[in-house]
Amino acid sequence: MGDCAQSSWMGSPHLHEFLGRGPAYAAALGELAAETLWPTRCAVCGSPGSVLCARCRRALAFIDQWRACPRCGAPWGLRECTECNALSMEGTGFAKPPFEGCVSAVLFDDAAARIVRLNKDAGERRLADWMAYYIASALPPEWARASCVTFIPDSAKARLRRGYDHGRELAAATAGLLDLPLVDALGEPRAHDQRELGRADRFANMAKALSLTESPASRARLALYDSVIVVDDVFTTGATLYSAAQALRADSDRRIWAATFARVY
């Protein structure tokens, strides 16, 4: 009877279902153990429970898009922009921003800096979902005409250090929220790290630093789309996004929009 019962259990669909769910159960137990030993904490205030707690989400310095410059996204540039006027554009190599419009969700303050830094340099990849949510929420309705999303890829050195491409993950999350395809349109940047450079040096550093990907499959896919939203984490001077827009227009007069989580101002 015991052997018969054992044979019946071994051949039953319940066992196969249990074994099929084994990896999921193991992963759940692993997450439970990790949360017990190292509980998830808010990126801004450090309180346990969430990567970005409700209080800190409400306190983010959201940019009022009704007051922002519709061309470059500067927070208070609706009537007269201090960032993309003729005088401010001197020394950039551009007469005007090379995209149809730019939007940033929040000001780059201490809270935004912590979110970006933890996502980019500390491996807290779950923050990309929140950053993408705020990017998608800030986009004007007319941007729905865009046909795909792309991003500025990390250098090979940065990908090796982080173990992933943070820019691609942010763009993928944004594309998912917008229900648009993600296209790997740009090749690896040929430029030095920008973080210690001033405005003029950033534009010089990024001049022609970006170009279309050399992948025939990705270029063929990009050719299907006549408009694109370039997603990045931070708009500092605009040099990187300007270079990206320039590269994306190298083979087509496609429409370009730019969107970032945070804006330095």
Image (cartoon, grey):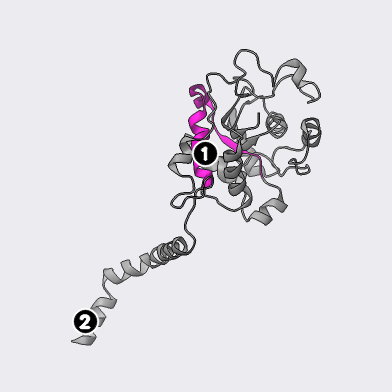
The span picked out in magenta is 127-153
Which amino acid does the dot numbered 2 rest on? Answer: Ala
Q: Report the disc number at residue 15.
A: none
The residue identified by callout 1 is: 132
**In terms of secondary structure, what is the magenta stretch mainly?**
helix
Rendered residue at 63%/26% (across/down): 254
- Reading the chain from its start, which is encountered first: label 2 or label 1? 2
145 shown above or below 78: below
Describe the element under mark 1 as helix, strand or loop.
Answer: helix
The residue identified by callout 2 is: 5
Which amino acid does the dot numbered 1 rest on? Answer: Ala
| Closer to the camera in the image, 40 or 252 | 40
Q: Is residue 170 left or right of residue 210?
A: left
36 shown above or below 125: below
Look at the image and say whether residue 133 sits in the magenta stretch.
yes
257 shown above or below 183: above
The image quarter containing residue 55 is top left
203 shown above or below 10: above
Residue 247 in percent (x, y) is at 71, 33
Residue 107 in percent (x, y) is at 59, 31
| Closer to the camera in the image, 118 or 103 | 118
Residue 27 in percent (x, y) is at 43, 63
In the rendered image, the quadrant that contains the N terminus is bottom left
CB within 8 Å, label 2 to label 1: no
Pick out the residue farthest to the top.
Answer: 79
Look at the image and say whether residue 230 sits in the magenta stretch.
no
Which label lies toward us, 2 or 1?
A: 1
Rendered residue at 64%/23% (across/down): 72
